[in-house]
Each structure stands twice: as C-alpha cells, then as structure tokens.
Amino acid sequence: MEHRGVHGTAGIGAGGDTGNGSGSGAGRFGGAGWVAVVAAGCAVAVLATGPSWALRRPEPRPAVEVVAPGAPQASTLPAPAETSTPPAVAGASTLPVVVAAPSRSDLEVVRLDPDPAPPGGSTTVHAFVANRGPDTTASPFTVVVTLPKGVSAEGPYFPQDCQVVARGRQVRCAFGAGLPPLESATALVPLRLSPDLQLGPLPGGSVAVHSADDRDESNNRQPFDVRVVEPTAGS
C-alpha cells in the first residue's frame, strides 16, 4: 500500500496547540520528535517543529453563547420567595380548662329593714346573705338590691365595685366563691330619701341573691321597707 507523506509543519496556536486540536498525546517523543497519526488506513506523519517541552496544555477560553436568529433571549428569572412559617400565637395553650363543679350549698336572704330616716335623710340597706350549707360555695354569687320609689342609691358601696343599673332602680354587688357553710356576706347600699316623701312605711324594696350553686330558690329573695319618720330635733 502506497503511503503519501504530508510534508509541512503543524501549526502551533498561541497556547501551543497543534493543528489537529491535540496539544499532548501518547505519540509524542523527546527532542525534535514525530507525532504519529493514523487516519483512513494511511499513516500521516507530522513533524513537530519545536521541542517537546514547547507543547503546552491549551489555555481555557471563555465559552461563547450562540443564539439562533429569531430565538428568544434567555432571561434570568427572579428566585422564588422563601416560604415563611407564620409565628406561633402568643399565649396559646392546649391545656384543658377545669371548671369547678357546683357545690351543695344553699344561699338564703335574711330580711333586715334599714333604719328609719326623715324625708331628705339617708339610711343604709344591709343586704344579708347566709350559706345554709352543707358545702362551701364553689361559684360566685350576685346580690341585687331593688330600691323603692322615692329613694336613690348614694355611694360609696360595699363591695366597692357594686354597680347601679336599671336606670338607678337596682344595685348589683358581686361576691366570689368560697363562702363557708353557716357563714354570711353583706352588701351595704346607702340610700337618700326624697325630701317630699310622706311619713310612713315605703314599700317596694327587695334583696335577692343569684348563684349557679343554689338549687333552692325559694329563700333567695326578701322584701324590705323604708320607714319615713319625722326629723328629730337638731337634725
């Protein structure tokens, strides 16, 4: 088979590349060596014009992005926003709520009429409530004092947080749980009598108590009378 020699020097690029794109290989010899390349069944000898140490590894070159005509340009999409975890609700609790069971207590209103007072004078309603037992009260209770016509509530009250409601016709006083059996609690509601009242008893007042514990409501309300009397000397 006839071999044709390809004479000439292999082109050396700026980075020391040979014209065949291979800067180093197994067929390199020292000094002015030959690089043997076999292609299409024929031996092609390429004479290296420089010494072997002159063949350097090709320098990396920046990649060139080729965009076909008419193709949309690549765009940089913004990074998706990070998903944030909502903060935990402050004060949230999974503990069960314990509700006190009603006690076997029986609240009773004891009738006490206020002291007599002259027209334009003052007196005080003692709203007296007793616990007949047998248990200590486990729930709060409310004492409601209803006023007769011709009088008005005039503080200070006991307890201090008593509230005047129903357009001034009632005073409500709240008491906490824990009243022992055979013990009592008293709300104090001062009254001012109208100066034009007639002498004699003034009916229409009452004291009532309300509690979730109390199962017997037959003794939860009592009336009271305000006696209007003549002014005493020097009053």
Image (spheres, grey):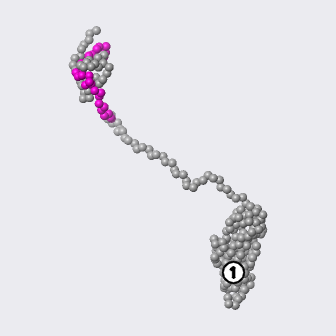
Which residue matches tag 1? 123
Query: In the image, what residue occupies the spot 32% across and 20% down?
Result: 26
* Prevailing secondary structure class for the magenta stretch in the rendered image: loop
With 111 as the anchor, is 73 left or right in this view?
left
| Residue 132, image quadrant | bottom right
Q: Callout 1: helix, strand or loop?
A: strand
With 34 as the anchor, is 182 left or right in this view?
right
- The location of residue 146, given as percent across then percent down, is 70, 74
Up the image or down, 204 lies above or below 230; here it is above
Q: Amino acid at mark 1?
A: Thr
Q: Which one is in front, 79 or 13?
A: 13
- The location of residue 141, given as percent across then percent down, is 70, 66
Residue 36 lies in magenta, yes or no?
Answer: no
- Which corner quadrant holds the C terminus? bottom right
Residue 53 lies in magenta, yes or no?
Answer: yes
Query: In the image, what residue occupies the spot 72% across and 64% down?
Result: 137
Query: Seen from this angle, which residue lies furthest bottom?
Result: 233
Please give the range of residues in magenta: 39-67
- The location of residue 198, given as percent across then percent down, is 71, 85
**Camera sees residue 186:** yes
Up the image or down, 132 lies above or below 6; here it is below
- Which corner quadrant holds the N terminus? top left
| Residue 147, image quadrant | bottom right
- Mark 1 packing: few (<14 Cα in 10 Å), some, or many (20+)? many
